[in-house]
Image (cartoon, rainbow, N blue to C red):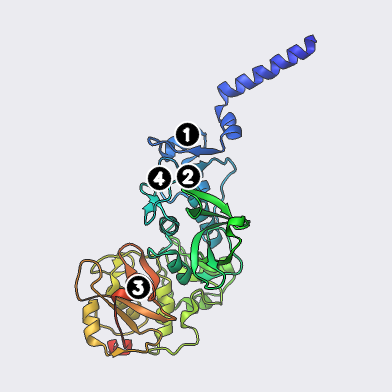
Amino acid sequence: MLKQTVSSGVLIGVMLVGFIFFPGLMAEAADRVHTVASSETVDSVARDYHISAEQLMATNGLPDNKLYAGQKLTIIRTAYTPAAYQWSERGKRIANYAKTFLGFKKVAGEETPVKGFDSSGLIHWVLSAQKVPIDRLTVDGFYKQGMDTSTPKAGDLIFFLEKESLKVVTAGIYLGKNQFVQSGYGAETVQVRSSTENYFAKYKLAYKTYTPKGEHIVQSGETLKGISDNYGVSVNTINNRNALPAGELIKGQYLQIYSNPLFPFYVNREAAYDKAEKVIKYAYTLRGFTYAFGEDDPRIGMDCSGFIYWVMKEQGLSVKRGSAEEYFSLLPKIDNPKTGDLVFFRDTGARLGVTHVGIYLGAGRFLHTTENAGVHISNLSSGYFAVKFESFGQAENLIY
């Protein structure tokens, strides 16, 4: 009896010592998820759990130091080893960041943590915060814009369609193992749901990806030789797949490493001019580069016409540096555009007239740059661009 009492006392003493002198151990065992309070910061939360701020941000896919009251932060002590250049890692960050908003309220038409989210608003906020250049679309728009995938991974989008009409009903951010984060549709808050729930059984499933495999994000100081050695793909092959002018790299470029085109809208389509395919390949590498009015250099930023001027100039094409309206005035208007032709829009933003231009890819897609998303791909069928569409222009006449 005495031995049992002594043993119990020792156990209690060890627990007290652990609680007093090693509070982090208790937190690790009891509090794997932390709910952010209004006054907390990344540094203060990390300090409370005796982990680094970098570790906390990496675990939860936080794009910056901004926290929102009510966010659910996962606390993990295992050392975080980033796969800096892999899209699978980007997908995990997307999925983890989406989970931090569990419990946030559903509000139709909204897209911020402060006001709330609808299902498409949550997708837009999370993808944009993770620097995936994307328009603010409806769930149907995200479905049309995304790339099909038969092997969904964390960070891809999951869609639910009516089986007969194939109308998109709702969507979420896929986590893997049939789970996804979604705002609303049967609930009043952001929740983790399962596609195996009876609630979703009547719908057809589809998956789209905005985080494709096979791209390398250029880091500061990298060389083509280093990237070539890393992937075991020759310098010439990487050059050709990305139409890199003189092998020059710019930090932040997305280089296609593998053979299958990531965005094959232009494949097997007639080109508008000899170097149209190279212009498109090179323009792809600049997705996500920022918008800057009046500029035409990706290292500074580019407006819509500056983007076109830069990619054509870098491919050795002699073009005039003009505005969208000036390009519009120079080109014959056509009804059946070829890959590489230009597409014009009217009355965008607060300006009137022909104010926006992009490079047509085929299948209704075009490459352009806007203030919010930077350089990215959009679809002519999306509500905004369908209304603002002016005409196609024959790009060959721009070259002299």
162 lies above or below 106? below
Residue in view at x 56 percent, y 50 percent: 81
Q: CA distance from mark 4 to mark 1?
A: 14 Å
Percent from the top left, x then y, of residue 265?
A: 47, 80
Distance in Å between CA atoms under marks 2 and 4: 20 Å
The residue at 38%/63% (across/down) is 136
Disc 2 or 4, which lies upstream in sequence?
Answer: 4
- Which label is found at residue 65? 4
SS at circle 1: helix
**Disc 2 or disc 1, which is closer to the eye?**
2
For the C terminus, which image quadrant?
Answer: bottom left
Amino acid carrying label 2: it is Gly
Label 2 Cα crowd, 10 Å radius (few <14 / some 14-19 / many 20+)? some
Q: CA distance from mark 1 to mark 3?
A: 43 Å
The residue that label 3 is drawn on is 368
Residue 86, visible in the rendered structure: no
